[in-house]
Image (cartoon, rainbow, N blue to C red):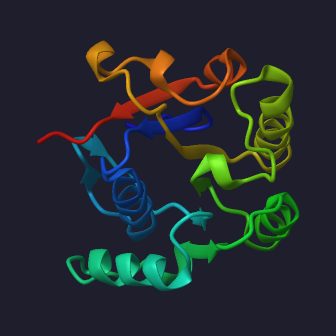
């Protein structure tokens, strides 16, 4: 479900509940639960959850809802930050939080909003985002888990990595990929 020290991504269609899945995964790891979706958790992990999409109120609401169904003791292993509104690069804030907190896992939800750059279909445009992620992984020795979107349409293709938004450079960076879709 989440291999340690890999470049991991959860990509899916709008409404597939990617953010809830990623947050619950992080909260289970922070709390030292026995497992998550069949994957064993051997110990509590320090998690930094970075929201770039929902905003502080919604992220806090989700956090409270998920932890209300747990015997939540993971406060010291969980830090979340949120940035919403006009998007600019988040990397300086993320680096500061990583240096201060030193997590085992960094969850970025969602990758599309990490930068002012929105043209992810061009390799030279997404390369700056990939460089930031690679620098973080190398410098901080942290597992990275990014939530990302699929392109609109293409449902007839099914769940395939080519539906993921972004140039092939992003697909080449990912070492572990989970794809999700909503169903009716």
Quarter the C terminus occupies: top left
Residue 136 lies, in percent from the top left, at 80, 46
Residues 179 and 42: in front is: 179
Q: What residue is at 16 percent from the left and 39 percent from the top?
A: 183
User: Outermost residue, left direction?
Assistant: 184
| Number of marks | 0
Q: Quadrant of residue 87?
A: bottom right
Where 49 falls versus 154 (above or below)?
Answer: below
With 157 as the anchor, is 27 left or right in this view? right
Image height of 73 relative to 154, above or below: below
On screen, residue 26 versus residue 97, left or right, reads: left
- Between 77 and 157, the residue placed more toward the observer is 157
On the image, the x and y values in percent for residue 88 come to 82, 62
Q: Quadrant of residue 34?
A: bottom left
Identify the residue at the far front of this view.
153
| The N terminus sits in image quarter | top left
| Residue located 55% across and 35% down the image | 8
Residue 93, quarter of picture: bottom right
Residue at figure coordinates x 68%, y 23% from the top left: 173
- Where residue 103 appears, x then y in whole percent? 66, 61
Q: Nearer the viewer, residue 113 or 18?
A: 113
Q: Is residue 100 left or right of residue 30?
A: right
Q: Position of residue 55 (x, y in %)?
A: 55, 76
């Amino acid at each position: 479900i989440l291999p340690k020290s890999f470049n991991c991504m959860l990509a899916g269609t709008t409404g597939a509940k990617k953010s809830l899945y990623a947050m619950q995964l992080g909260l289970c790891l922070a709390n030292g639960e026995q497992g998550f979706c069949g994957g064993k958790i051997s110990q509590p992990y320090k998690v930094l959850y970075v929201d770039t999409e929902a905003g502080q109120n919604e992220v806090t609401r989700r956090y409270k809802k998920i932890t209300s169904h747990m015997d939540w003791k993971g406060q010291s292993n969980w830090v979340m930050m949120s940035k919403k509104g006009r998007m600019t690069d988040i990397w300086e804030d993320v680096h500061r939080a990583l240096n201060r907190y030193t997590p085992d896992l960094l969850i970025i939800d969602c990758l599309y909003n990490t930068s002012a750059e929105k043209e992810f279909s061009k390799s030279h445009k997404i390369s700056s985002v990939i460089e930031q992620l690679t620098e973080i992984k190398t410098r901080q020795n942290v597992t990275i888990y990014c939530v990302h979107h699929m392109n609109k349409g293409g449902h007839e293709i099914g769940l395939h990595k080519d539906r993921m938004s972004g140039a092939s450079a992003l697909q080449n960076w990912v070492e572990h990929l989970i794809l999700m879709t909503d169903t009716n």
